[in-house]
Image (cartoon, rainbow, N blue to C red):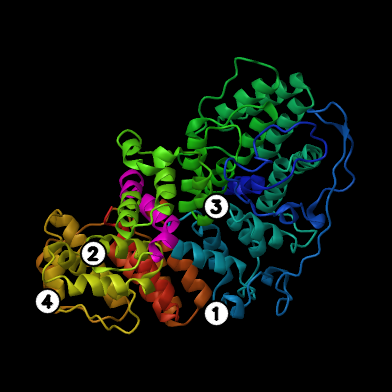
Amino acid sequence: MKHLRNSAYLLLALLVAAPLAAQQSAPLDIVPLTPIRPSPIEIEAIADELAVPETLAPAGLPELIDAATGEDAAIEVESVEVEVGMGQARNPEAVGLLEEAEGGFPYDMWSGSDRALIERLLPRLPAGATSRAMNDLARRLLLTVAAPPGGPMEENLLAIRIERLAAMGNSVAMNRLMRSAPPDLYDTALVQTRLDSLLLIADYVGACSLARDLVRRDDAPYWEKVLIFCQALNERHDAAALGLSLLRERSVEEDPGFDLLIRALAGDESAKLESLPSPTALHLSMLRAARLSVPEDAVEGAEPAIARAIALTAGVSLDFRLRAAERAEALGALPTETLAELYASVPFTSEELAYPWRRLKTDKGPMARALLQQAIAIQVVPAARAEVLRAAWQLGGEQGGWDGFATAARVTLSELLSLRPLPELVWIAGDAMRALLAAGRPDMVGGWLELATAQAGANAKAAAAVAELSPIIGLADDGDAAAWDDDRFLAWRQSQNGVPEDVRRLRTAMLFGLMSALDRKTPPLALLTLLDGPEVTWVKTPPPALMRQLDRAADEGRIGETVLLALVALDETRNGAPSPMTLSAAVSALHRVNLSAEARAIAIEAVLSREF
């Protein structure tokens, strides 16, 4: 790349299981080297993936003095042979981890696409979307073994893919792809990825040597900041202060956290970092070296890998770690199972577990959600289990909106699946169906829908649940068995009576557009309702040229380009929540290139998220 990508900082996900390098004599407690108590969680053993690839490791490193021990330290680079999708790949840019038979896209997925367009848009692939369906498509796009698009090469696509995986917090896949990079490849984002890798496995010798080499190559502020950090580590505080002064003279963007941490490393006891709203890998590596705690506000707005690293960080409160874990799970950077294990590790008394409602009166935070998760597991009466399940979903939605509800639905999925749709549980049928849809299991909704439908005549809540959710369930119905006709449309509209009219019209437009995008039959009355209402102006929409290109790519069957354009169009961080027109266009495009299941999943998530 010809420019720095700040998202490469997100490689702090490498910390989740990395052992301290040999030169550290005592742990600084940024990464938990022992399991959490009382119920230990099993962190995946990825030390092999975390080793810096030999082809990317600096050669001929000079000896440095380890700032932590005061002794000579040396780097040890592990050589690992990895076969990375070379069955068809001959071009270095074509390597990947997924063949088509393993869930990837076709080898020729970029056939017919213009390379300049792909080079421009691939760095904009969303990282950290809260949509599971979007994250899965992005991951598959980046990992597929595929011939690069035709056209003159300006940017290295393998380097971009590695950077995007790092931004998504997928450190294991990122490291495996990095090992396949040609040893002579120089790319700013890729080199920054390598530098952060060395920092975050506490290999300060290798990191500092590499930073010195990079400073000689160009004057990027990041290389200089790492070098200043290295000077502070080696107790060359005058040199570090001079370097910091020179950075300020260059009008480099201010970084109060970095400045304060340099002071802390110099022994300034008044240098206490109280706030770090946008933590980076360098920040947290410096916190480790300075033996300072991670500030409480570091979770809010944290990027995927940063949130994951903090979630698995010792030295901060358990409540704080749980908040970070919930965010990392919502962003797709932490397995749901790991969050569940973290919840299970929180110590509660038998009385608290028996009466979780007492805590809920005063505590609505992650500790309360951990309590509910544990309380669900000890319920043996179906009605009692259902009650605690519903409380967990409601608490998640109240405190975290759609993201909180979806996380709660995923983390309680196994408990919900063990609950049979019995007649005496009809009161939870609507909540159960919504949770199953949010957790990505529309295939398990049928039993609860049948229960609610059977009792709709005598139970108003069951009737309302059927009316409200039938159109959404219909989006997942590949066979269009549950057509959305005028009667069902009227029932759905009535179920929305408590909603403001502008919101109801938005939901109507979204459902109508998605039904059409998926080639479903749409009720004539819905069309008339939309035509009769006032025009709507969307504040933010993707550029018309992008949407036109998406339509053309789908029509011409360019799968890779279609997926890329659809995900860029749906990126909420750039465009805000997608309008019904944008959403239906993206879903239609994916449907037309035979990614119907993925299109339906995105549609369901979008509709459900608008309820919060």
Which element carries disc 2, helix, strand or loop?
helix
User: On the image, which quarter does residue 44 sit in?
Assistant: bottom right
Residue for point 55% across, 58% down:
123
Q: Nearer the viewer, mark 2 or mark 3?
A: 2
The residue under label 3 is: 338
Residue for point 55% across, 54% down:
168
Q: Is residue 556 left or right of residue 254?
A: left
Residue 220 within the magenta-colored segment of the rendering: no
Which element carries disc 3, helix, strand or loop?
helix
Q: CA distance from mark 1 to mark 2?
A: 57 Å
The residue under label 4 is: 487
Q: Earlier in the sequence, mark 2 or mark 3?
A: 3
Q: Are marks 2 and 3 in contact (CB under 8 Å)?
A: no
Q: On screen, 515 above or below 165?
A: below
The crowding category of the residue bearing disc 3, from other C-alpha atoms within 10 Å (few below 14, some 14 to 19, many at least 20), is: some
Q: Nearer the viewer, mark 3 or mark 1?
A: 3
Which element carries disc 4, helix, strand or loop?
helix
Q: Earlier in the sequence, mark 4 or mark 2?
A: 2
Q: CA distance from mark 3 to mark 1?
A: 41 Å
Q: Nearer the viewer, mark 4 or mark 2?
A: 2
- Tell me which segment is drawn in magenta: 394-418
The residue under label 2 is: 424
Q: Is 242 in front, or is 611?
A: 611
